[in-house]
Image (cartoon, rainbow, N blue to C red):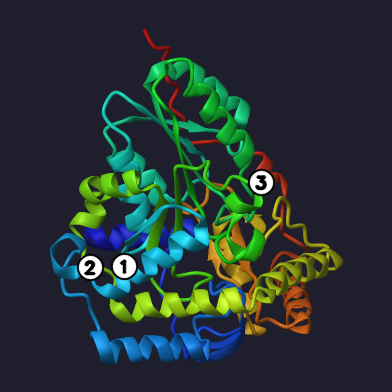
Amino acid sequence: MSEIAARLAELEQLGLHRRTRLVSGPQGPSVVVDGRPALLLCSNNYLGLADHPCVREAAADAALRWGAGAGASRLVSGTMTVHRALEQRIAAFKGTAAALLFGSGYLANLGIVGALSRAGEVVFSDELNHASIIDGCRLSRAETFVYAHNDVEHLAWGLEQAGERASLIVTESVFSMDGDVAPLEQIASLAARHGGGGRRGVRVVVDEAHATGCIGPGGRGAVAAAGLDGEIDVVIGTLGKALGSYGAFAACSQEIAALLTNGARSLIFSTAPPPPAVVGAHAALDVLEAEPERVTRLQANARVLRAALAREGIDAPGSSTQIVPLIVGDATLAMDVCEAALRDGVFAQAIRPPTVPDGTSRLRLAVMATHSEDELREAARVLGRAALDIAGGAPFNSSAVENRTATEITRVPASG
């Protein structure tokens, strides 16, 4: 057996082997996956805009007018009129002076954390932040302090220990695997407190990938919902989830946008987002602003699903958004429940380590505004039956969340 074959066999044994699934047709509330029709309950197309006629037509027209690709990086010849128009539109939507487009959310987080932190400084990162943030911290020359999930007391302790070395706090607003919301007001207050008194400023970066278009006034996100417009240094968002396209952005001041243009390596050394994706996202913003009821419908659908799951005896702790995690714990068991649900017509992908901490494998349910209430109630019944068939009862275990531990907490020594 080759080394690669042995590694693959080990992944199989641990229940961590992955494969791609083939979805036929657009990302609607129902799809054909691996040849079987199913209700789609694991897509980030939260507002149903990826297959909206206006968005599709705008993207198709952009391909005809401006081409399929941008042809170069942003700093060479890749910044086209469509990029600048969308940046201006996003800045207005997010209430910032400027916005800067990146090729993807992963590239945005990777580049922004690295550009805003330097050797000798400290980046403070929530333990459940997305892999792109974790990798941005790793590639940064700064030291990383990983604070316990949403634990502002732990964060405050770390800031005190770091003293003038502190530089950056980075967190998701809506956490992608748990569906809970960061305590943004307290984080912003801590940053302001520790940036005063002659200390070096503490900047705050908030990743709104799963909040933009989903919560807050007009779908403007958790920062707006918390009343923090103008108080967060960089708001990161994606074009590839609620806005139904592909790419990402940083909404910030003109000064920070200039720094990112000069220092974010993932922007400097990547081809600019393709015109069809850029124009498609612009059209999606048009639909969102014209139809804010989509945000209301999304939130209502999330409540319907949580209530339906509760009637089936299934606990979904912590979530207050369109992301509803069903914690199983064991990776193999999570996959078994996923496959059983798919056989009965519900596609809810199992999520396993390293995406989530060991012992917290789960089915991550993602609600869409375009689901009907009846579809969501039926999905809850299917998931309940799958749990009964596979485990002889509901395997979903909220204590798995409570018992998880951070695997990469760095204690920062006191300055001086």
* Residue at point 62%, 26% (across, down): 153
First of labels 3, 1 by sequence position: 1
Q: Left or right: where does residue 287 sit relative to residue 324?
A: left
Q: Give the amino acid at mark 1.
A: Arg
- Quadrant containing the N terminus is bottom left
Where is residue 238, by image quadrant? Answer: bottom left
Judging by the rendered image, the residue that carries numbered circle 1 is 84
Quarter holding the C terminus is top left
Tell me residue 78's x, y (percent): 19, 69
Left or right: residue 22 versus residue 292 is left
Is residue 155 visible to the viewer in this orientation of the structure? no
Disc 1 crowd rating (10 Å Cα; few below 14, some 14-19, many 20+) is some
**Residue 156 in view, yes or no:** yes
Under tag 3, what secondary structure? helix
Tell whether label 2 touches label 1 (CB within 8 Å).
Answer: yes
Of residues 402 and 213, the one nearer the viewer is: 213
Residue, disc 2: 79
CB under 8 Å between callouts 2 and 3?
no
Q: Nearer the viewer, mark 3 or mark 1?
A: 1
Place of residue 121 in the rendered image (x, y in percent of width and height, measured from the top left): 33, 26
Tell me the kind of residue under disc 2: Thr
Crowd tier of the residue under label 3, counting other residues whose Cα lies within 10 Å: few below 14, some 14–19, many 20 or above: some
How many discs mark residues in the rendered view?
3
Name, please, the residue furthest toward the top.
416
* Residue under numbered circle 3: 400
Task: Say which element carries label 1.
Answer: helix
When asked about the image quadrant of residue 367, the answer is bottom right
Q: Within the image, what quadrant is residue 211 found in? A: bottom right
Q: CA distance from mark 3 to mark 1?
A: 45 Å
Answer with mark 2 or mark 3, whichever residue precedes in sequence.
2
